[in-house]
Amino acid sequence: MIDITNQPNGMKIMKKFFSIFGTILLLLIALALIFNEPIKEYAVNYMAEQHMSSLTAKKVKANEKKKGQYDFKKVKPISASQVAKASVKNTAAPIGKMAVPSVGLYLPIVKGLSDDALSTGGGTMKEHEKMGKLNYALAGHYMTQNGALFSPLENVQLGDLAYITNMKKVYVYKVFYKKIVAPTAVYLLDDDEHKVLLTLITCADGGTNRWAIQASLVRTLPANKTTLATFSK
């Protein structure tokens, strides 16, 4: 019998075989991981934490100039492939941070409603909305009970405090409204010149309805080491 490992061509064939086999094995492992819900949530949390830890006022200023996607019809349920794509090349533009400490929610605020944006944090729902003015509306995915992204919002109670920051100021809101509404309840996004609101929207009832949470502005603080600590777990 000829030992192909001792032949030049045989060595090339063996190396090619193991290279292809290794690549296929890695792909199968990767597919198994991204379709595993806990791993998917881990990837989402990792992306969010990366943006939270690296965000600066300078980055916010640069990202505010970028364009966002605001077509509600293009928003799809979060998928494993969507998370995998975002984890490889994420185009989300963080423009702030949000926190609802009572339910353990700490996320970046990102511009618009693109797949990458909503795989990372809470997305702005209106193109020209400003923190601390009128009705600042954010949307986020519901993944699992007590899971990542906006999942914890179903546990919010009236009177809880919600915080947002653009790294220059910290805006403190108090929750006064929490209801399950139809997807058509877009009136909740309307501005009222007599109110300064924060509106948070996520899925409910398996995606057929929406959780709508509204809070009113109660305080505005300078962003410094002490106030920004609110956005750390």
Image: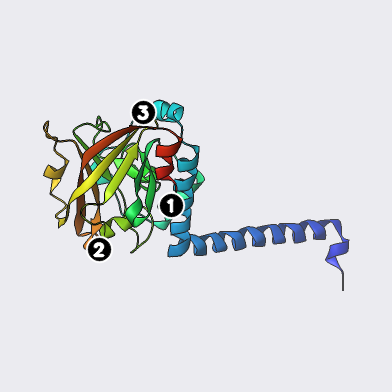
Q: Residue at x 43, y 42 (%)?
A: 229
Residue 83 badge = 1
In x, y percent, where is residue 97?
A: 38, 40
The picture quadrant where one finds residue 9 is bottom right
At numbered mark 2, what does the secondary structure look like: helix, strand or loop?
helix
Residue topped by disc 3: 64
The amino acid marked with disc number 2 is Gly
Q: Is residue 113 visible?
A: no
Q: Between disc 2 and disc 3, whose residue precedes?
A: 3
Task: Give the side of residue 29 with respect to residue 10, left or right.
Answer: left
- Front residue of 103/93: it is 103
Q: Between disc 1 and disc 3, whose residue precedes?
A: 3
Q: Between disc 1 and disc 2, whose residue precedes?
A: 1
Residue 206 badge = 2
At numbered mark 1, what does the secondary structure look like: helix, strand or loop?
helix
Q: Residue at x 29, y 46 (%)?
A: 162
Foreground mark, 1 or 3? 3
In x, y percent, where is residue 145?
A: 33, 64
